[in-house]
Amino acid sequence: MDKFLITGGRPLHGRIVVSGAKNAALPALAASLLTDQRVILRNIPRVRDLSTMRSLLEDLGVDSSVTHETHGNRVEIEARQLLNPVAPYELVKQMRASVLVLGPLVARFGKARVSLPGGCAIGVRPINLHLKGLEKLGASIKFDHGYVDVKADGLKGTDFYFDTISVTGTENLMMAATLAEGVTVLENAAREPEVQDLANLLNKMGADIEGAGTPRIRIRGRSKLQGAEHSIIPDRIEAGTFLAAGAITAGELVVDRCIPEHLTSVLADLEMCGVKVVGGPGGPQTLTVKAGSTLQALDVTTQEYPGFPTDMQAQFMTLMTQAEGSSVITETIFENRFMHALELARMGADITVNGRRAVVRGPTLLSGAKIQASDLRASASLVLAGLAAEGDTIIDRVYHIDRGYERIEEKLTQVGARIVRISESD
């Protein structure tokens, strides 16, 4: 397994470019199953999860090709026929977002067999809402040896209320409803920018979707969808991670190709704890983080969008190790998302975890150590810690970070970080 070797203590200076959003690209790839015409997607990040999704689509019988462009990959997909309606355990266990093929397969082909994802490092994330919604649309559900079999002889529009907000649940049902007969209304739907981006793609494909980005989404079903071309939005979590990197190293970092409106809560909290972030130079899709006054402790609670994102919680915790005072970080989305706290403590951080609350007391001097990543965002938080620490930090199991960050070590090196990837062969 690859490792990162980071020599800390160097302020970051320069321009760093944000890649396309992994969490927008995944449902966009799944949406290609809804038509037999060619779908062209641009700004696809070169990350492991997208390779896994392409492998799954190819297993299903989809033709795809990839072209490298200046910003991300250009992926062309044609789902002319279905050879195999199965999303196997071997792929679903690698990436839970594989369940996003469920809605499109049932809507267009009338059947799907998808492995149940089970638990993961950051908590249990069941797909019961996906299944309840498909049942309301007219599908039949059966469970068989760790798989769920879903069949439908034509879906019919319905009203469905999400008991708890689910991003992938909203995306799955929204895709399924595009080919259902009649009108479907999703209430208490997820409002994330990635949901909006998927709706924009589906509308380009001929769907009739209103309200994406609000708690109420209305979909008028069509008998058929067509091909389309679409560019994936920038990754707001990657942008937030780089803003935190600039702040924790007391540098001046330009974060390019981001959408500030997608980062409202993150930017507000960074400002409240003393981080100066300004627009430009370079236009409305550029933000600059500048070294300023001493960081101040701040309490943060993760919430569904537009609240503070759970995917930025670990990075913010690392930042708070360098802030004056005590910060209380409350995690409301996942029940087991503080595993990075133990690794930060090994580097000298003063963190006390009690259930879904963590108290971070700072500032503390971080020192390099051998540490281990447990999940995607935990990996990013440990990279930030390594950048700020004295001496050398070795992070093991960085395959986690490869799932969602495109060549992060190369991007950080270009702005002054000392970070190298060490392979087993080395």
Image (cartoon, rainbow, N blue to C red):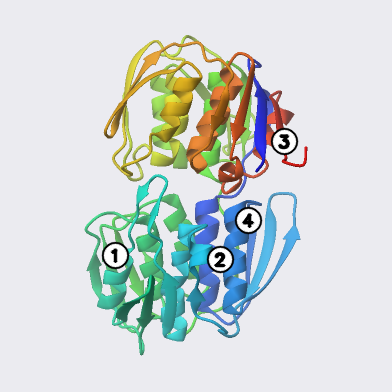
Tag in front: 4 or 1: 1
Q: Amino acid at mark 3?
A: Ile
Estimate how packed mark 4 is, as few (under 14), some (14 to 19) or many (20 or more) residues with alpha carbons within 10 Å.
many
Q: Quadrant of residue 17?
A: top right
Q: Secondary structure at mark 2?
A: helix
What's the mark number on residue 422? 3
Tag in front: 2 or 1: 1
Q: Is residue 77 visible?
A: yes
Q: Quadrant of residue 248?
A: top right
Q: Nearer the viewer, residue 127 or 17?
A: 127
Tag in front: 3 or 4: 3
Q: Secondary structure at mark 3?
A: strand
Please name the residue that numbered disc 4 is placed on: 44
Q: CA distance from mark 2 to mark 3?
A: 31 Å
Q: CA distance from mark 3 to mark 4?
A: 26 Å
Please name the residue that numbered disc 1 is placed on: 128
| Sequence order check, earlier mark of 4 and 2 | 2
Query: In the picture shown, does residue 117 fall above or below 322?
Result: below
Please name the residue that numbered disc 2 is placed on: 29
Where the N terminus falls, by quadrant?
top right
Q: Amino acid at mark 1?
A: Asn
Q: Amino acid at mark 4?
A: Ile
Rendered location of residue 284, percent (x, y): 57, 37
